[in-house]
Image (tube, rainbow, N blue to C red):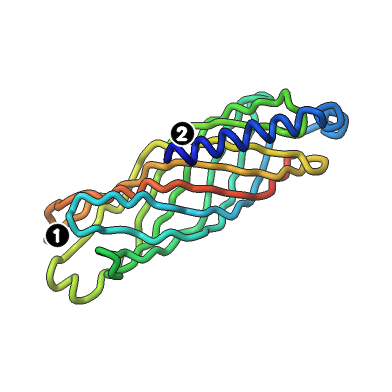
Amino acid sequence: MTASLFTSAALAATLAAAMAAPLAAHAQAQQGAEGPWLVRVRAVSLNSANRDSTGLNLAINDRVIPEVDVSYFFTPEWAAELVLTYPQKHDITASGARIGTLKHLPPTLTAQYHYNALGAFRPYVGAGLNYTRFSGVSFAPAIVAALQPSISKDSVGFAVQVGFDYQVAENVYLNVDLKKVQIRTDIKSFGAKVGELKVDPTLFGVGIGYRF
């Protein structure tokens, strides 16, 4: 995650905290009883780092994807979040030219700490693991004939996040979330490894959640 992105997120969180403080008493009166489950739906902008060591300048395209996450609160502050979506299709490019497609399914599990002393505004940080399964890999016939390319189908890596929930009604929250996820795959030609593609996307999501 770039330093400027972290800086922007930190400034946004600081500003939101300052705005939320006068509303804390009002929000406390509105909150009522809350259950341990929080389900969110988000629209997520996926922006890949695309660092490639093969010399072919391999990359996958950026896109906006749908996301559903389920959180369980063990205490008012500590929660576990499972992020889910369906397999997402991407173009594979080499130096900007499209050479194929793939799908990836990237569930992510994080442990989170939520700071609840600001009433309606509830920032959090999290860290955990991502598992990505690549499928539906297809290369152009000319690429297949020349290189017989393939990729590793599984990736396990770390994930970190920062975000906040803002209560807009009883048990209903606006959510803003920023993640950095480690997703990498070996690139092979005729069965021999020739390099690694580090997708390592940054994901910025906005959505709505319901607590029960």
Amino acid marked by disc 2: Gly
Residue 57 placement (x, y as % from top left): 24, 58
Q: Which residue is mark 2?
A: 128
Residue 101 placement (x, y as % from top left): 34, 67
Q: Which mark is residue 144?
A: none
Q: Residue at x 73, y 43 (%)?
A: 173
Which picture quadrant has residue 182?
top left
The answer to whether residue 178 is above or below residue 48 is above
Amino acid marked by disc 1: Ser
The quarter of the picture where the C terminus appears is top right
Judging depth in this view, the residue of 26 and 143 nearest the camera is 26
Mark earlier in primary sequence (2, 1): 2
How far apart marks 2 and 1 lie (CA) works out to: 32 Å
Say how many tags the image has: 2
Label pair 2/1, CB-CB below 8 angstroms: no
Q: Residue at x 26, y 52 (%)?
A: 152
The answer to whether residue 115 is above or below residue 153 is above
Is 34 placed left or right of 160 in the picture? Answer: right
Q: Residue at x 43, y 59 (%)?
A: 62
**Secondary structure of residue under mark 2:** strand
Is 15 placed left or right of 170 in the picture? Answer: left
Is 162 placed left or right of 60 in the picture? Answer: right
Q: Which residue is mark 1?
A: 189
Q: Residues within 10 Å of mark 1 (few under 14, many from 20)?
A: some
Residue 11 placement (x, y as % from top left): 59, 34
Identity of the residue furthest to the bottom in this view: 141
Q: Residues within 10 Å of mark 2 (few under 14, many from 20)?
A: some
The answer to whether residue 33 is above or below residue 45 is above
